[in-house]
Amino acid sequence: MRTKTLISKLGRMFPKSIAKENHDYVGLMCGTLKEETHKILLCLDFDNIALKEMKKEDLHPDLIISHHPFIYGTRKYVLEHDPMKKEVYNELISLGIPVYSMHTNFDTGAKGMNDALMEELGLENIHPDASNPMMRVGTLPAPMEVREFSKYVKEKLDLTYALLIDKGNKIVSKVSLIAGGGSYKWEEAKANGSDIYISGDAPHHVRRDIVTNSFNYLDLPHEIERIFMTQMKKILLEMDPTFEIYIIDHEGLPTLI
């Protein structure tokens, strides 16, 4: 497929304007896009470990698509202050491999991150929250006790741990979710009538606010976003079934002690 066509199709599904609203950095991060793209490498983060894995597997993609921005900030500042990032950047330039990142635009867009996770959990009537287009809201096919539901989520997403605050309704029917670091949006989930909010990276003061406001919150590792790779692969193959898609899934969960 012509690379301009691919980028245009992805842009219509996951517009950069969404990321700009979130003060995010997305799009072409490194290198020059090729005329044609046939081989695509997908990863959550492209870093020095992913680079080593790519070279070990002797992969030569035409394009790398990462979820988290390969360069978060201005290129000049990041490369001046992060020598490891600069080393990876320079090697990609020498290899002629561009990196394109899709972050909060993928999280927010239809068929993106949060839709994929809600579907993985078997929720129904999935839709964006009225006040927050990134948040997804859905209902369980049948109500569940809050701890039972939390264990169900942990198992469905193949996690070794999850952190539950169960100070709200004992029975869960309506669920809100933002993958990654969206814990501070819990008030919007409570306002839309959800019985529990699922997100991650909750600092102490956010957890205390949830407790004192008698709400349920399930804090999950940021690594649940690895679903990006399988979902993006599905989207790309729907565009062109002849794409060769490679995945580097190198981000394991922290060790549970």
Image (cartoon, grey):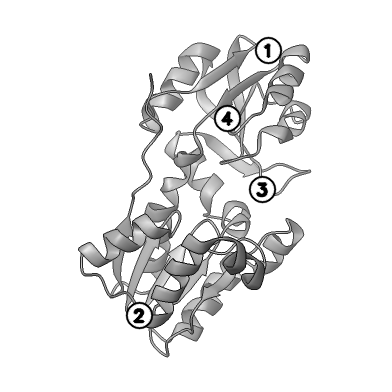
Distance (Cα) linking label 1 and label 2: 53 Å
Distance (Cα) linking label 2 and label 3: 35 Å
Task: Answer above or below: position of 7 versus 14.
Answer: below
Front of the two marks 4 and 3:
3
Callout count: 4
State the image coordinates of residue 124 (x, y, percent, origin top left): 53, 36
Residue at 71% x, 67% y is 17
Front of the two marks 1 and 2:
2
Q: Are marks 2 and 4 in contact (CB under 8 Å)?
A: no
Residue assigned mark 3: 134
Distance (Cα) linking label 4 and label 1: 17 Å
Q: Which disc, if any, is residue 95?
A: 2
Q: Are marks 4 and 1 in contact (CB under 8 Å)?
A: no
User: Which numbered disc flags the more N-terminal residue, 2 or 4?
Assistant: 2
Residue 147 located left or right of residue 12? left
User: Which numbered disc flags the more N-terminal residue, 1 or 2?
Assistant: 2
User: Which numbered disc flags the more N-terminal residue, 4 or 3?
Assistant: 3
Distance (Cα) linking label 4 and label 3: 17 Å
Residue assigned mark 1: 168
Density class for disc 1 (Cα within 10 Å; few <14, some 14-19, many ≥20) is some
Residue assigned mark 4: 139
